[in-house]
Image (cartoon, helix red, strand yellow):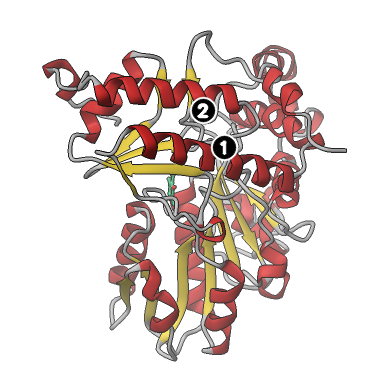
Amino acid sequence: MPTDFRRTKQMFDLPEGIVYLDGNSLGPLPRAASARISQAVTAEWGEMLIGGWNKAGWMEQPARLGDRIGRIIGAEPGCTVLGDTLSIKVWQALASSLSLRPDRRIILSDEGNFPSDLYMAEGLAQMLGGDYRLVTVPPERVADAIDESVAVLMLTEVDYRTGRRHDMADLTRRAHESGALAIWDLAHSAGAMPVDVAAGGADFACGCTYKYLNGGPGAPGFIYVAPRHADAIPALSGWLGHDAPFAFERTYRPGAGVQRMRVGTPPVIQMAALESALDVWDDVDLADIRAASLALSDRFIAGIEAACPDLTLATPRDHAQRGSQVSFRHAEGYAIMQALIARGLIGDFRAPDILRFGLTPLYIGIEDVDRAIAILTEVMQGGLWDRPEYKVRSAVT
Ligand SMILES: *Cc1c(COP(=O)(O)O)cnc(C)c1O
């Protein structure tokens, strides 16, 4: 059955009069989440107290919800677990990968990768000492930069600024042919388009759940470990990754497979929110999401290019290379975005000059895109952004 996007839109609580094109940064509130969170607080924490770990299934939640995310990213069952933040999951994936390629020293990534991923790689390389090194190249040069010095290729499938998409299967195959591993950050692809980590050959994958998966601010990260790496060292050896946490053994013994990637106590209440967000996906076909997202982004690009010649498209026109966002460049991008937000069109700004708009068919339709085009056109053609109050930078842009 084709996905009913009118039904999915009804499942979100969006303020009246707003066009929300920022679900790529923070997904909106699923209607069912408030009651589910309230139940976790009053009926579980309030009534069960410490018993909630057993009676309400809190301890299994990271694996149970991990598997629901696993279905969205094409993972084999039992290979995905939730916890911590994406940055930490990136660090674990990197450290495990390096331990699997002890004779190699290079982490290869692209210059457009999200700073936290690059900082994590650099920090880990420094900590390991020796000649461990992060090497970054422009995104279109990654394929040529893979050689036999590379221990691990670490890429974000969809670039957070431009929305440019890498070919996961092709680059992973090239990495493997050179004897390297491949880590994929799915922050801008999980829930945005079909992803198939198993078929794509990913060794490790990780992502966050507060963007396209709508788990709410503070929702945990996830990590996928390919079954062939089930015995890889977990890198952060916390007690909940132990094979028997409640045996309180003096010696760390890693748990089975991806369970060893757990570190400490999970955020139970936040995961209640994530659980209701994942319910939305039960009757959603990611191929329908992809088709609708491309139609919306094509329409948005055509509308803006026709009306706003001062904005330069930063997102690839080629569908195969496009994620689920559209970005334009403008030197006054920050002020323009504030003027849009003041008129009810919410996107965001990424330094130095990117205006970013996420197109999320679960709750965004053609009428929203047409309103967005109209508001952006009004702001650009009237120069309405050129006011001092739109140039005052907030902490979060
Ligand atoms: C959003 C995002 C992050 C953020 O990581 P947190 O640890 O969850 O704050 C990291 N990497 C990429 C590629 C992102 O898009």
Closer to the camera in the image, 19 or 122? 19
Confirm or deny contact between disc 1 and disc 2 (CB under 8 A). yes
Looking at the rendering, which quadrant does residue 172 occupy?
A: bottom right
- Using the image, tell me which numbered label, if any, was put on residue 296: 1
Farthest residue to the top: give it.
16
Closer to the camera in the image, 359 or 374? 374
Looking at the rendering, which quadrant does residue 137 occupy?
A: bottom left
**Residue 326 pos. (x, y %):** 44, 42
**Residue 77 pos. (x, y %):** 79, 57
Q: Is mark 1 within 8 Å of ligand 1?
A: no
Instruction: Name the residue beneath numbered marker 2.
Output: 369
Dot 2, how many residues are within 10 Å of its Cα: few (below 14), some (14-19), or many (20+)?
A: many
Report helix, strand or loop for mark 2.
helix
What's under tag 1, amino acid-wise? Leu
Q: Compared to 215, does 42 lie above or below?
A: above
Farthest residue to the left: give it.
388
For residue 243, side relative to residue 18 (left or right):
right
- Which quadrant is the N terminus positioned in? top right
- Residue at horizontal 35 percent and vertical 50 percent from the top: 314
**Residue 171 pos. (x, y %):** 53, 75
Distance between the Cα atoms at labels 1 and 2?
A: 7 Å
Q: Compared to 345, does 144 lie above or below?
A: below
